[in-house]
Amino acid sequence: MSDNTDEIPLENPTNNQSENLPDEVPTIVDTDTNNSIQEAENMEVHHHAHDPAAPHHKKNWKSYFWEFLMLFLAVFCGFLAEWKLEHVIEHSREKEFMESMIIDLKTDSSTLTNMKSSFGIVRTHIDSLIPLLNNNELLDKNATEIYQHQVYLNRFTKWIYSDRTIDQLKNSGNFRLIRNKDVSNGISKYDGYIRNFIGDMQKNMVERKFQGIVDASNEIFKSSVFREYYKSGKFTYHEVKLPNTPYFFTNEKFVLQKFINMLDQYAVSIDWFSVNIDNALQQNKTLDSLIKKHYNLKSDE
């Protein structure tokens, strides 16, 4: 019965399934990987397109030379500009120092002139006083005249040096700003003379003689006369008022002769000092003219 059964045999399911499969197996592509590769290729192409080492961008020695030359000129021009500015500033300061120096010289000239006049007056009164003191017997008779001369011997004009500009030039190292050697040497010469033959001489010689006169006069004269004289009329000339008798502390000849000897010494120091003042005034005038001429400064005259 089984032989007569008309049945269609079933196909092998395995074969049937393989027949239904497509001829090609689709390839699975990783899109992220492809994108990365593409970007890398693009970057590589872009890099090579702008590579300065590429043959068409290569520099020759002329290019390097011109770049160096332009850089050198820029630095050099900057240096020249700075150097020029520095010299302009220094020349301006130099002229300012010289203008200040002219003012100091004018002040010194006025002080020296007044000082010479003051000591000249003292010198005159010394010459008038000495003969009156020589005769001790006529001391009381000549008392008014003696005191009148002695009043002026109490005056002393102190030298004050206008050295502000010179001190600035020396202490700050600005003497180098003075380009003209004659001016520089003239200032140094003037400064040395003033300090040694005016300042030091007055301090070590003239002032000491003056102090000796003051000390010695205390043994002879009554100071109340001088106090009253300056109190009533200050430094203007007027007659002295004699004290009560006796007019003097002593009329001893030895004391008077000793005082006269000191007056002579004081007179000698004044004479010597006056010669130095004249020399200082001459140097002052010479230096003033030299500075004005070299720096084209206007004269006060």
Image (cartoon, rainbow, N blue to C red):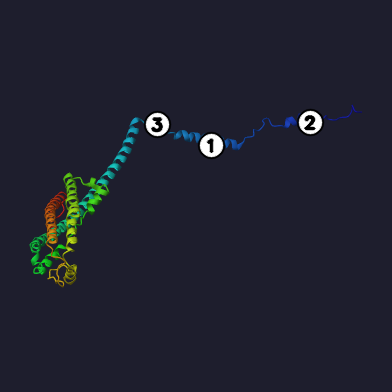
Mark seen at residue 39: 1
Q: Which mark is residue 56?
A: 3
Q: Is residue 84 left or right of residue 43?
A: left
Q: Select label 2 or label 1 by which is in front.
A: 1
Q: At x 46% / y 33%, what residue is drawn?
A: 48
Residue 126 position within the rendered picture, expressed as x and y whole percent measured from the top left: 11, 61
Circle number at residue 13: 2
Kind of element beneath mark 3:
helix
**Residues at marks 3 and 1, CA–CA distance in whole angstroms:** 26 Å
Q: Position of residue 41 (x, y in %)?
A: 52, 34
Horizontal side, residue 15 vs residue 123: left or right: right
Numbered disc 2: secondary structure: helix
How far apart are labels 2 and 1 at the CA level?
Answer: 48 Å
Q: How far apart are marks 3 and 2 (CA)?
A: 70 Å
Towards the viewer: 67 or 118: 118
Farthest residue, direction top: 3
Q: Earlier in the sequence, mark 3 or mark 2?
A: 2
